[in-house]
């Protein structure tokens, strides 16, 4: 097991190298100059040139890239060009918001998607199956920004049930001091019930928006995996022994169908962490996604580079955890 983990960690090196190279080159392909953005429209060419020299943007690309990688190896992500704040500090203050939102979204996908997939497989070709297939197709097809705006219009503007943006109300936030940055956990630790209710209310709409696509995918994968397992001989044997349908499905079928479901959930969770840009922007969620989006608009190279590398590392580590969980789900899986 330890050798397997070591090999996987070493395998991160070329992956991260490719990611750093890709994000570095793609950023330079975007039209615009961060020096012009920072200097302002009224800046003279001399001022812009001086600023480019100060930021190191006048050096050859390969020198800029090696400087970026060299700093990265020393765990230095640089400072934001616009704010001057160290990128690592920005990540530290924002990652909890993205992690909390992504966790809520993937929990929605798991809690609703797996039962829906099981019911669809057991009731194959019946109305429950057709509803699940149609619902999952609709969930995958709905654009995130369109769904988010629709939910805001319906539940915030029309019905006034839920807040349209932010993580906590302004009036509640004045009397609330975060501890870990995970607002749900912090409200519990502070024993602040009104703040907990307020945080949950702010979390519902973005979590539903972000969790719709993973929910649809998990439901489809669960249905396919269950259909495959339910056709196996050992399931027929279990039924022939007189076991109840409940035990056959949960004890024998679902357990053996968990590997593809587990893989899908892991990949979706990693994707949510890095792909929450639209959702965080729509709901003014102060996480990594909206921060990277603002960095792209401002051509803030250190912000985008640091944010993307951080998300990539988290994504790969999540997949490592998923791989390691295979042995727990299926004892036949060995890493030696």
Image (tube, rainbow, N blue to C red):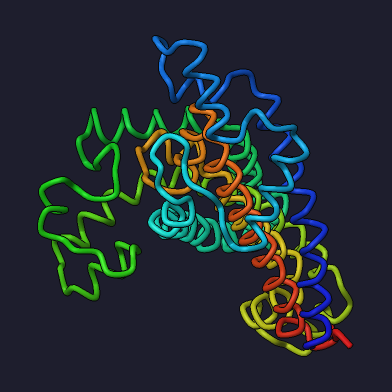
Nearer-the-camera pick, 2 or 329? 2
Q: Is residue 296 left or right of residue 27?
A: left
Q: Is residue 280 left or right of residue 292?
A: left
Residue at image coords 54%, 29%: 299
Give the quarter of the image for residue 285: top left
Answer yes or no: is residue 222 visible.
no
Q: Check the image and report above or below for 179 versus 331.
A: above
Give the quarter of the image for residue 158: top left
Is the C terminus in the top left, top right, bottom left or bottom right quadrant?
bottom right
Question: Residue 41: x and y, percent?
Answer: 42, 11
Residue at image coords 83%, 78%: 236
Residue at image coords 77%, 90%: 241
Question: Residue 138: x and y, percent?
Answer: 59, 36
Is the N terminus in the top left, top right, bottom left or bottom right quadrant?
bottom right
Answer yes or no: is residue 290 visible.
yes
Question: Residue 81: x and y, percent?
Answer: 47, 36
Q: Check the image and report above or below for 176 versus 217.
A: below
Give the quarter of the image for residue 185: bottom left
Q: Check the image and report above or below for 114 versus 148.
A: below
Q: Is residue 139 left or right of residue 221?
A: left
Question: Residue 238: x and y, percent?
Answer: 78, 85
């Amino acid at each position: 097991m330890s050798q397997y983990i070591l090999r996987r960690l070493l395998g991160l090196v070329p992956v991260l190298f490719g990611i750093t190279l890709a994000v570095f080159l793609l950023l330079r392909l975007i039209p615009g100059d961060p020096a012009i953005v920072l200097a302002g429209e009224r800046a003279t060419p001399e001022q812009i040139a001086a600023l480019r020299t100060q930021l190191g943007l006048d050096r050859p690309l390969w020198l800029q890239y090696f400087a970026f990688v060299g700093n990265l190896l020393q765990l230095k992500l640089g400072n934001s060009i616009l704010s001057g704040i160290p990128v690592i500090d920005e990540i530290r203050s924002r990652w909890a918001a993205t992690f909390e939102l992504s966790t809520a979204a993937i929990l929605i996908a798991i809690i609703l998607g797996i039962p829906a997939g099981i019911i669809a497989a057991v009731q194959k070709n019946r109305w429950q199956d057709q509803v699940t297939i149609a619902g999952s197709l609709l969930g995958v097809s709905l654009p995130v920004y369109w769904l988010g705006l629709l939910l805001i219009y319906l539940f915030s503007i029309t019905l006034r049930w839920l807040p349209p943006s932010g993580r906590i109300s302004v009036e509640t936030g004045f009397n609330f001091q975060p501890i870990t940055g995970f607002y749900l956990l912090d409200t519990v630790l502070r024993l602040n019930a009104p703040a907990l209710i307020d945080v949950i209310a702010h979390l519902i709409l973005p979590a539903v928006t972000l969790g719709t696509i993973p929910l649809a995918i998990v439901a489809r994968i669960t249905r396919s995996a269950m259909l495959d397992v339910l056709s196996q001989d050992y399931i027929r044997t279990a039924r022939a022994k007189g076991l109840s349908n409940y035990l056959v499905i949960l004890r024998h079928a679902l357990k053996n169908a968990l590997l593809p479901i587990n893989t899908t959930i892991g990949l979706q969770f990693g994707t949510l962490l890095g792909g929450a840009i639209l959702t965080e922007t729509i709901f003014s969620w102060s996480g990594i996604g909206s921060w990277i989006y603002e960095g792209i608009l401002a051509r803030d190279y250190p912000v985008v580079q640091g944010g993307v590398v951080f998300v990539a590392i988290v994504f790969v580590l999540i997949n490592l955890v998923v791989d390691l969980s295979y042995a727990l789900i299926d004892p036949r899986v060995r890493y030696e």
